Amino acid sequence: MSGPPVGELLESGTQASRPARWWGTVPATGRRLLAVLAVAVLLTAAGLWGRDLLAERELRQRVALTASVAVVSSSTSPPGGSVRWFLSVRNDGPRAVAVTSVTGGGGRLRLGTALATDVPVPPGGSADVPVSVRLTCAAGGTPDPLRADIAVRREDGEDARRRVEVGSAHLVDDVADTLCGVRPALRDHELSGPVLGTGPPG
């Protein structure tokens, strides 16, 4: 049985041993320098990889929210009409979140959760979260800005909370002004719900 020509064997052996022969010709100081450079390259690559992982993790965990008052009213259901207050929550973060609770307030107003289930909010989108708005009239003073503490659950299952100043608060402030003008003794009065019973006693 014949094998490859002797010339091919010698050539292949020469090619295989060439890197080893070249390394043997490099001075000791050169070999140490090359080893240091190789380690530096590996450490730099590991550092960049770790930084990318941290950046990705921060991106996944970033929660950025804004909120404004929204209202829906009906003149017929239930009889006498009703008013429902919502917090329109916008998700300016890169990942979807689900609103799990809302608290907060400002001056005479108090916000509370009125959630049957968590409310999902897609990235770059918004959702109306039903809230309880309770009014306590007080004499004098300038109403404090309306703020909301919004608790959310991120996609990774972790919880987060953000405190935001609520936009369009004049919608509920106008109602509060009207009610407190005719019923200054109101305490802990729920504004979200049937309209009957919210006017002055007859």
Image (tube, rainbow, N blue to C red):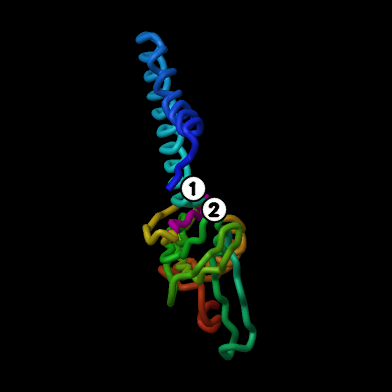
Callout 2 touching callout 1 (CB < 8 Å): yes
Q: Amino acid at mark 1?
A: Leu
Please rate how many residues cluster around mark 1, counting C-alpha atoms within 10 Å: few if below 14, some from 14 to 19, many from 20: few
Residue drawn 51% across the image and 61% down it: 96
Q: Considering only vertical position in the picture, is 181 above or below 61?
A: below
Q: Residue furthest front?
A: 1
Judged from the image, the secondary structure of the residue bearing numbered disc 1 is helix
Q: Considering only vertical position in the picture, is 60 above or below 187?
A: above
Q: Is residue 41 magenta?
A: no
Please rate how many residues cluster around mark 2, counting C-alpha atoms within 10 Å: few if below 14, some from 14 to 19, many from 20: some
Q: Considering only vertical position in the picture, is 24 above or below 189?
A: above
Write the start and end of the magenta stretch as one range: 141-151
Which badge, 2 or 1, comes first in the chain's sequence? 1
Residue drawn 42% across the image and 41% down it: 54
Q: Position of residue 106 (x, y in %)?
A: 47, 55
Would residue 119 be seen by someone viewing this image from the given angle? yes
- Would you name the residue on which mark 2 appears? 94
Q: Position of residue 94 (x, y in %)?
A: 54, 53
Residue 123 falls left or right of residue 27: right
Residue drawn 44% across the image and 18% down it: 22
Specify the label residue 59 is tagged with. 1
Q: Position of residue 31 (x, y in %)?
A: 38, 15
Q: Amino acid at mark 2?
A: Pro
